Amino acid sequence: MIFFQLRLCHVVALVLATSCNVIWAKEQVPLHTEQNSLQPLRKYSWVRTFASIGDSYAAGLGAGNRIDWSCSRYDHSYPSLLNSKTFLGDNPNRTHQYLACSGATSEEVLAKQVSALDEDLDVITVSAGGNDVGLSIIMNQCIYQFFMSKTDACENALNETWSKIEYDLSGNLTALLEALKPKLNEDHGRIYYTGYARFFATDDEICDNVTWAVWSYESQSAKQFLTLERRKIMNDMVQAVNKKIEEAVHKAGDQVIFVDYDSYVAENKGRFCEAGVIEPDPNRNGLCFYEWKTVDPGYTALRHAGDDVPKGSFESDIAEWTNKTLQEHPDWKFGPDEEVGLDADKMREEQAIGDTVSWLLPDFWKRVFHLRPAGHLLIAHLLMSKLAETTPKICGSETGEDYASLVD
């Protein structure tokens, strides 16, 4: 058992930066290995019914190829990886309900996704809570300023988020988990709840003079900067959300397991504003989150304006803020590092039609602050390590034989 856990820990450390561009190990060897070359460490034949619910982090927004339009699910998300031959194996009878949806709050996950789940599930993965407390609003008010509000808008957003974390989040998470538990196989079903990772390093003050405000016509004094103090506050919020999730998981009992990947990203310098880095640096080796011009290995830059976006999604927030600014300032130019002319007339003609919102920006803006493929690979391996801890209790002596074969 100890050998197996050590081997899993080694694998997690080894693959952390795959497609974040390098492996962090004693030798920083570039890795462009495809997902299917990583062989599974054991069989998980007991996982026959598997479901994945949650927000844009569970949907894998921007990671790989888009496999669902209305909820922005991608094929390099950790749920998609888990359901592959590489991870859970090639059981032809395994079913996977993939219901995660970009922009979903935990209340929306409860109302729209949990109600659609099958019964008697062996494994459920969940990511939810960030949208409950308005983290995307902070991204707008305190970082990109897609829509310019009053000068105190950032502080107001931070205060409102702290209030939601303190007073609202725990109840939302508990309600979600209590509704999920009856969906499990009563003998061995498990829920694996993933947290979030802090976005910023706080080792130096180089980023204090960096602004990612997107409109070139803003006065310099109106722009928000990535100061050390601001970065620490936003990191503290992520940790506070993770703590609430962990507390709710503990309260829910042994059927629910918390999966915390934050420390792996931090220890391996996968965040924005790492020491000595001059931002923006969207394609630096090791970066685990998307900046606006990040290009993953094997993919081309997404410079064109893509399809309009579904209402209620993370992307639609960006679109609506941007469109609102253009309505008020049609002559403004977009772009924190190079100006991009946006067709304000197209936006005013289309507006929000049906279930979509006009998208005028280069497509790479749809996924900012979301995990790149290596981040999802990390989570998938951590989930496998949690499954390994559970499997002996479920499979009995059969598991012992598998473990023995690993030692051999």
Image (spheres, rainbow, N blue to C red):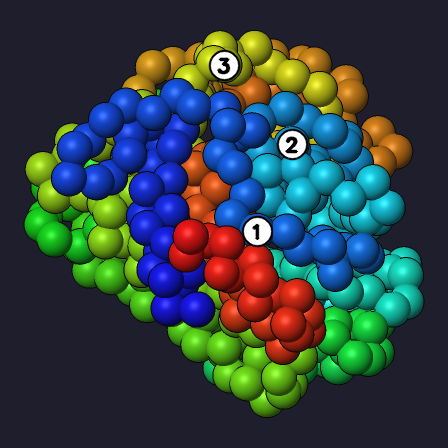
**Residue beneath label 2, please?**
75
Label 1 vs 2, first from the N-terminus: 1
Task: Kindly identify which residue carries mark 1.
Answer: 42
Q: Is residue 84 left or right of residue 374?
A: right
Q: Position of residue 270 (x, y in %)?
A: 29, 43
Residue marked by disc 3: 299
Instruction: State the image coordinates of residue 144 (x, y, percent, origin top left).
Output: 40, 39
At x 41% / y 73%, what residue is drawn? Answer: 240
Give the percent coordinates (x, y) of residue 66.
Answer: 68, 27
Residue type at the position of mark 2:
Asp
First-in-chain label (3 vs 2): 2
Tell me the SS state at disc 2: loop
Three-letter amino acid code at disc 1?
Answer: Arg
* Residue 34 to residue 168: above or below: above
Splitting the image into 4 quarters, where does residue 275 fall?
Answer: top left
Cα distance between the residues tagged 3 and 2: 14 Å
Q: Nearer the viewer, residue 152 or 235?
A: 235
Spatial separation of the CA atoms under disc 1 and disc 2: 23 Å
